[in-house]
Amino acid sequence: MQSAPGSPGGTSTAGVFAPVHDAENRPITAGGFVDRGPVVFVDDSRSSGLTAWRYSGGTPEKRYIVESLGGGVALLDYDHDGWLDIYLVNGMTYDAMSGKAAPPHAALFHNNHDGTFTNVAAQAGVTNDRWGVGVAVGDYDNDGWPDLYVTNVNGNRLYHNNHDGTFTDVAVKAGVALGVWSTGPTFGDYDGDGRLDLFVPGYTAYDFSRPPVAGSDQVASNNCRFRGVSVFCGPRGLRGEHDHLFHNNGNGTFTDVSRQAGVDDAPGYYGLASLFVDLDGDGRPDLLVANDSTPNYLYRNKGDGSFEDLSFESGYAVNGDGRPAASMGIAVGDDRNNGMLDIVNTDFSDDYTVLYRNAGDLTFNDASRQAGIAETTIPFLGWGVGFLDFDNDGWKDLFIGNGHVYPQVDQHDWGTSFAQRPLLFRNTRDGKFTLVPAVKGTGLATLLTARGVAFGDLFNDGKIDVVINNLDASPTLLRNVDPDRHHWIEFALVGGPRSPRDAVGATVYLTAGGIRQRGDVLSGGSFASSNDPRVHFGLGDATGIQKLEVHWPDRTVEQVAPPAVDCIDTIEENRGVTARFCPSATTATVNPGER
Amino acid sequence: MKMAFFLRTGRLGLLFLCLCLLPGSQACFAQAGSDEVTPEVQQLYSEARAAQEQGDTATAIAKYREMIRLAPGLAPAFNNLGMLYFNSGDYSNAAPVLERGLKLNARMTTAQTMLGLCYYELGENQKAEPLLERAVAATPSDGKLQLSLDHVLLALGKNDEAIRRLNEYLKVSPKDQQAWYLLGKTYLQLSEVALGKVNQIDPNSYVAHEVAGEIDESMHNYDGALVEFRKAVELAPQEPGTHLRLANVYWVMGKWESAQQEFRAELAHAPGDCVARWKLANSMMQSNAPNDEILKPLNEAITQCPQLMQARVDRAHVLINLKQPKEALPDLLLAQKANPGEPSIHFFLASVYRAQGDQEQARQELHTYAELQKAASAAVAEQANEAITLKSAAH
């Protein structure tokens, strides 16, 4: 049966759309600002000190696909002082690769507790100095201190936290160094042995000595055009790299169990992001993999050390048009407060961001249009993404960081732009979202080349902030200054003895104001990034919590005595709340840094 | 006693007559002057045979050469020597040897066949033709002989004769892929000749540009095809087919707006072309036109050509987008019956069943979709990997 040729070129799109311009005839991705409106975020990048650092990846011309991915960002409290620090992955330059210049370093910004951050990467030993991509946070050795897994184009790092402000790269010793182009990793205890395992997606084979250009022997066919214009080749047409699942042996080493677990990605799809998350409520983490221009993966955890590939059957492999999208980032969240996690995948311009509604029994339906996010997102090229309750009304909203990959888009009237503004969608509580207008001069009106995006309460004020790692630019720190006066609560979970110490994989159900919300402790997701591990709940006008239930990774369920609102509580498995920090109080009830 | 001398099969799998040298064999003496079979000749024959059994073709050839020097009237010796040369691919030496043998005894049909094949290999098609014709007449089921003759006929420009013979052969040997391939190539050559005549008559006519465009298109040179088809349209805008060819190239290139324009222009002159109408609708879908606008040309295409399944699948897709899943089902069921291996049909069926609340049926369709899609993806990935591997290894 003859069918349409499909979108030509190196990436999957939905075809061609008429350009959308704002009142000043700018492409909507670089415009559409309003003069007045509620200010949700302010750009505190400079005042925070983050602009002292910059991501560098190849050349501005972006002749090769490796220069386009950018890097991820992780939020973690590496020094246990109760405040989130920021880890930013850097790329590489060709001068550095040939020894003519120092390599761009990753950054570890220590939170100074006063709105500023200091880069201590060098002292901490986490500069990476390779062509970095992603990062995931996980306490793989259950010593109570968060470790970092950093992926690179050529040799990954497992930075073990030495508890003294420094880290040691033990990737080779641990058996997780790989050496192929790795992207957005995730930690999760897939076999329930209480130790975090590690999943690492692979993107494409890449040989720096023979980069893929049109007509070269590294590209199978002509996949080096976008809308008829020559651009860098791929990923379609390039040989794909397989994914890897590493089982934690409990002795500082890991074993590659990809094939026996059934997650080795035999076809070699172009993996960009991944996330261990319990999607069917059976207490075992399932696995999502966002693949670029190839079908996504949804693997159901069978509970026997292996997974069942339900990618197509679940509906997650492709979008509602039956087409594999150019998936970049993954967000999961219970945005309907029905206890079920929905999934959002960002993807390319000339395509819509996909909201997969969880219909139960591991069935997901593309509800992007019904939810009101499809049309708006078409001109944007989305990367890092997350559900966050930015206004603390008890309903999770959606934030997307955007930025194109082809500099050539700025030379054509295609309705898109290289630097793009982020998108914030407010949850209207009826299964739909509405775009929060970008007020001039505020964080939502900034033009960025966003890639990795992480979400967390950087200032311990109960509001979720956003950190963005921008391609070939300084990072962006969007401080949440939403004028709401809603209540909130956050939980830092500590697992044990049969759960991972950092409780990755735990699910918290909180009932307040007649609404039952769900939050999960996760590692990875977004694009190549890792969020604040604490679980945050906006409570609206509710001044008390009716019920608090923690489903620990060891599959035990604990009812926790409801604590006071507007605080950050530490909950230890089987011990309840063991520490509390309430920013509105003059003194902390318990030092948040103590464990 | 008759000593059979079974010669090893040559590259074309031919078996040849035995060489009878021993006294008393009437047949052999009938072929050879008996007084030429001297003990020395017999000795040379034995040595040649031994060398052959050892795989030492060079020695065997030398022995036979000495034999025919000593016994210039011994036709079988010429045949065997010719066979040795032939099997070694040394046609330039095989041919004169076989010619001399046949001058001595023109009735050796196998030698004639061998000589015909030599001439074919040497490109002496005029000489090859009569010999191979006789050979094919004697063994009409021999596909290799048939193909050799057809190659000769094609080389001599006797395309019609080649086609006739091939068609006759394929009636009795319909599974001969090589023969089908040669037939296809022959038709292609004929079409090239015919198309060449178009250019000779008027290289600047719209027909000539269409021919040039089609040649470019067949080689996936869409840029070139675009230029030629555009010229054809400029020269003959009212001629049915000119806009269609241009539209098809735009369609393949993903230039949806231009494709729509040309499809519309074509339909103005050829309103009965349901495929053009379907492609117009498809181009509108690709450029994300409103679904209700896409429905009109799809409905028209299907009314004109109810068996156009691709139009039915696209219509079903549009109806699903318009939240009319029930109306999409009949199209999908028809398409599924006609094309059960097309993945997209099962995907859309799953969407319809899900919308109707039949989760189990939806799941089954998705499972089928998954299997078909995985197979298709794996095939594409394998081809891409092979291509990259081959290109990487090439110098």
Image (tube, coloured by chain):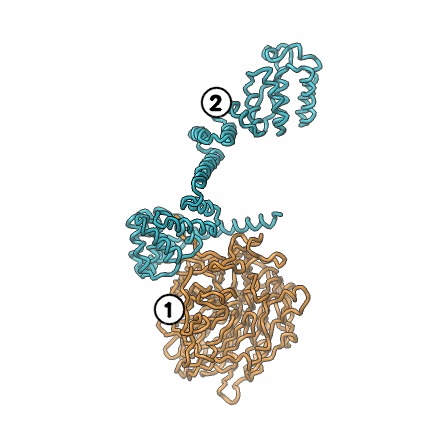
Chain colours: A orange, B cyan
Subunit of label 1 = A
- The mark found on residue B108 in the picture is none
Report the number of discs. 2
Q: Residue at x 48, y 33 (%)?
A: B179
Task: Please state which of residues A449 and A168 is positioned toward the viewer in this rendering.
Answer: A449
**Mark 2 → mark 1, Cα distance in angstroms:** 76 Å
In the current view of this chain or complex, which residue is farthest to the bottom?
A586
Q: In the rendered view, would you say A560 is above or below A95?
A: below
Crowding at label 1, few (<14), some or many (≥20) Cα neighbours within 10 Å?
some
Q: Position of residue B354 (x, y in %)?
A: 34, 59
Q: Position of residue A443 (x, y in %)?
A: 48, 78
Q: Position of residue A567 (x, y in %)?
A: 48, 82
Residue A150 visible to an observer of this rendering: no
Question: Does dot 1 land on a helix, a strand or a loop?
Answer: helix
Q: In the rendered view, would you say A401 is above or below A7?
A: below
- The mark found on residue B137 in the picture is 2
Residue type, numbered disc 2: Ala
Question: Does dot 2 land on a helix, a strand or a loop?
Answer: helix
Task: Please state which of residues A192 and B208 is positioned toward the viewer in this rendering.
Answer: B208
Q: Residue at x 55, y 21 (%)?
A: B112
- The mark found on residue A371 in the picture is 1
Is A501 placed left or right of B277 in the picture? right
Report whether mark 2 lies on the same chain as mark 1: no
